[in-house]
Amino acid sequence: MSTIERICIEEKISESGDACSLLAARTGLPKGRIKDAMNKGALRWRKGGRGAFKRQRRATAILAKGDEIAFFYDETLLTLKPPLPICISDEGQYSVWYKPAGLLSQGSEYGDHYSLLRQVELHSNPRREAFLVHRIDRETTGLILVAHNERAAAKLSQLFSGRDVEKHYLACVSGEIAEVGAKFTIDQAIDGKNAVSHITVLDSRAPASVQSEPSDRAQDLRKIDHGCLLDVRIETGRKHQIRKHLQGAGFPVIGDHRFGGPQHPMLCLTSSMIAFRCPLSHKMRRYTLERAAVEWLGGGD
């Protein structure tokens, strides 16, 4: 068996043929592995070298002379089994999903099987295309919207890019900040851009993940009984905004290894509520994740 672990090819096709055979000849990989990689989105194709690249999953697809391809093969990534998202509400033109920890919001050049969008396409009923509306970090769990046509994606994306969506997160941080019910605002700029987070203390002694039995996620889940549970409402959506704001305030999120949080098998941060006036139906919509469903609080079973 081939020991090739990673291949990156970006080139223009010089001789027509089916995608699987051309890639097998070009890479030396068995056709079975080529087919698996294509099915998982590792091949992107641009007909005649014009327009945007699109994923090509059919191994029998004919690639013509002059077409451009980008084939990014990573054996380690392709063997990963993605955690499955859960549909919270299906509104037809869009749906609301619970994204588990570890699942990417969208794919990369190496494929999309480990992304929310691809898993939504595979598990929607009825099956439909999935378009990105907004993102949450890979390690973050919780509510996220997915559009099912280009019109809905454009309108919802525009809505989420402004300040017309109410977005709340649950976060468990290290230490005791203040008494229950206390409120404060962090407005520290991020990467030179305005960023505002409104904090409410929900529980000053909240345990983060009370599981004691071994699980697939970690064999040593341990109780952290010194956390402080917060509700965080964000006005802006800068990259890692909540994590950076809480770290800067001296209260890093538990499990946030990147921004100085205490060790924990999960990042204790969950998108818990989204509310907005739908630009499609013009009706108010509110989607809430019950606290009992939050994995790092011992829920989600």
Image: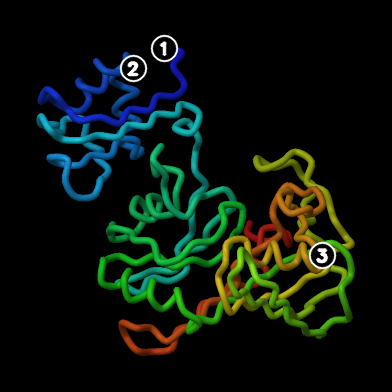
Camera-nearest residue between 99 and 71: 71
The mark found on residue 251 in the picture is 3
The mark found on residue 29 in the picture is 2
First reached walking from the N terminus: tag 2 or tag 3: 2
Q: Which secondary structure lies at badge 1?
A: loop
Measured along the vertical axis of the image, is residue 73 above or below residue 29? Answer: below
Residue on which the image places disc 1: 2
- Crowding around mark 2 (Cα neighbors within 10 Å: few <14, some 14 to 19, many 20+) is some
Q: Amino acid at mark 3?
A: Phe
- Crowding around mark 3 (Cα neighbors within 10 Å: few <14, some 14 to 19, many 20+) is many
Quarter of the figure that contains the C terminus: bottom right
Image coordinates of residue 290 in percent, x first then y, are 62, 73
Q: Amino acid at mark 1?
A: Ser
Q: Tell me which residue sits at (79%, 41%) in the image.
A: 220
- Contact check, label 2 and label 1, Cβ < 8 Å: yes
Q: Tell me which residue sits at (10%, 29%) in the image.
A: 65
Image coordinates of residue 284 in percent, x first then y, are 43, 88
Measured along the vertical axis of the image, is residue 24 above or below residue 282? Answer: above
Residue most extreme to the bottom: 283
First reached walking from the N terminus: tag 2 or tag 1: 1
First reached walking from the N terminus: tag 1 or tag 3: 1
Camera-nearest residue between 92 and 64: 64
Measured along the vertical axis of the image, is residue 256 above or below residue 238? Answer: above
Q: Tell me which residue sits at (48%, 33%) in the image.
A: 77
- Crowding around mark 1 (Cα neighbors within 10 Å: few <14, some 14 to 19, many 20+) is few
Quarter of the figure that contains the N terminus: top left
Image coordinates of residue 211 in percent, x first then y, are 77, 52
For residue 91, which quarter of the picture? Answer: bottom left
Q: CA distance from mark 2 to mark 3?
A: 49 Å
- Contact check, label 2 and label 3, Cβ < 8 Å: no
